[in-house]
Amino acid sequence: MKTDDLLNMLGSDRVAEPLPGAVLWRLLLPAALFSFAAMAVGLGVRFPLSQTLLSPEVLPKLVLPLLLGILAAPLALRLAQPLARARLAWLWIIPMLGFGLLVFAYLTTPSQARMMEFTGKTILPCLVSIPALSVPLLAAFLVALRRGAVMAPMRAGLIAGLAAGGLGTAIYALHCTEDSPLFYVTWYGAGIAITAGLGALIGRSVLRW
Amino acid sequence: MMHDRQADWTRLLRAANAGDAQAYKAFLHAVTPVLRGVVRGRSAGLPPDDCEDVVQEVLLAIHLKRHTWREDEPAAPWCYAIARHKVVDAFRKRGRRVHVPLDDFVEVLPAEPVSDPTERNDIERVIDHLEPRAAQLVRAIGLEGHSIAETGDMLNMSEGAVRVMLHRSLKKLAELRERLIEI
């Protein structure tokens, strides 16, 4: 095929692809509902939420990961646009807040209780459930990003993993009964890190084009 | 002159997005010689004919990713970014590691095709891997130069169906190339 012929053929294709953002919105809600349902059925919602989750020390375990998801999602989308600047440094706010909370909890917890609160009773379920509940969301992000033009697949996968991990963790927090920041900052953080690593790993191959 | 290119490409691509098919073709025709110059300049010993394969591959990518350009952005830097990414990728698949600074695109002398019949084989080999009807359609439009309407008549399809199948086939071609091209 001559290059001129190719240009003519490309010129007659007037169908435009949907933007990654539009694709994400379409997929993210069903994915979140799916994860929520999996949590509610498989693990059970902690009850009554209003009395437990709303105390000032416990609320961050829902709000911080949710905030991470809300911050990271648009950044991930920007990484699928060649000219858009993604200010990834903003994301550091979340681990910094988490760390502050951890220090605060360390100082206010009596020394003999620290170790018990740090290890809690559910490290393993937490480390398994968070990535598992995040995977459907991660899939939504990766499918959406594939529709864009990702220049750095690993980085985009990582940020997508952070966003999915954040949202997945917020869903898990509706079940989890560990209320000490010593537990949830550490192990939620680890669960999100696992999800982000997974995103980077998968992104490296699927976001290539 | 460089400033003109920026303004021209942006104007053409905006018009294209607004539905002006001629402007879109003009945009593609303006991009091609620049792209060809960059690919030849960085060819790392690849023969000119193979370079033209790379050019075609990059043009297909620019076409399929054109929705990632936003109208408030200048079109040329967007185009360079897509092209650079794809040129590096195309050479990597052919076993060559090249570095393509963005300055290449700004400073390059636009190049014309070398030999007159720049018939290239890569894309035709890939067309064979499409499903039969899609392959027929791509050959009719791409190789034989039929219009959408003519192709619809030939294949007994509505114009809308031809358009959708053309778009899907182009996406499929890009995917297949990614998997099938060897040196």
Image (cartoon, coloured by chain):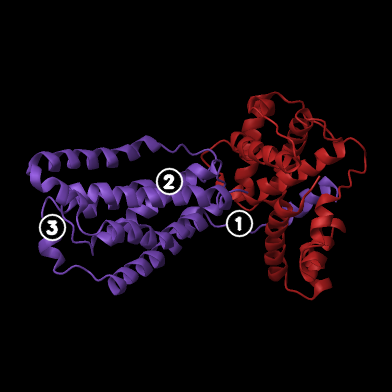
N-terminal of the two: label 2 or label 3? 3
Cβ–Cβ under 8 Å for marks 2 and 3? no
N-terminal of the two: label 2 or label 1? 1
Looking at the rendered structure, which numbered label has been put on residue A54?
A: 3
Q: Report the mark closest to the observer, 1 or 3.
A: 3
Relative depth, front residue between A43 and A85: A43
Q: Chain of mark 3?
A: A
Tell me the amino acid under the disc marked 2.
Answer: Ile
For chain A, give the colour.
purple
Tell me the amino acid under the disc marked 1.
Answer: Ala
Name the residue at 76% across, 34% down: B39
Tell me the amino acid under the disc marked 3.
Answer: Leu
Name the residue at 13% across, 50% down: A57
Q: CA distance from mark 2 to mark 1?
A: 26 Å
Q: Secondary structure at mark 1?
A: loop
Q: Report the mark closest to the observer, 2 or 1.
A: 2
Is residue A73 among the parts visible in the rendering? no
Q: Quadrant of the N terminus of chain B?
A: top right
- To which residue does mark 1 refer? A16
* Chain assigned red: B
Q: Secondary structure at mark 2?
A: helix
Name of the residue lying farthest toward the right: B116
Q: Residues within 10 Å of mark 2 (few under 14, many from 20)?
A: many
Q: CA distance from mark 1 to mark 3?
A: 46 Å
- To which residue does mark 2 refer? A159
Q: Do the residues indicated by labels 2 and 1 lie within the same chain of the protein? A: yes
Q: Residues within 10 Å of mark 3 (few under 14, many from 20)?
A: few
Relative depth, front residue between B102 and A200: A200
Side of B52 where A131 appears, left or right: left
Percent position of residue B125, x then y: 83, 56
Q: Quadrant of the C terminus of chain B?
A: top right
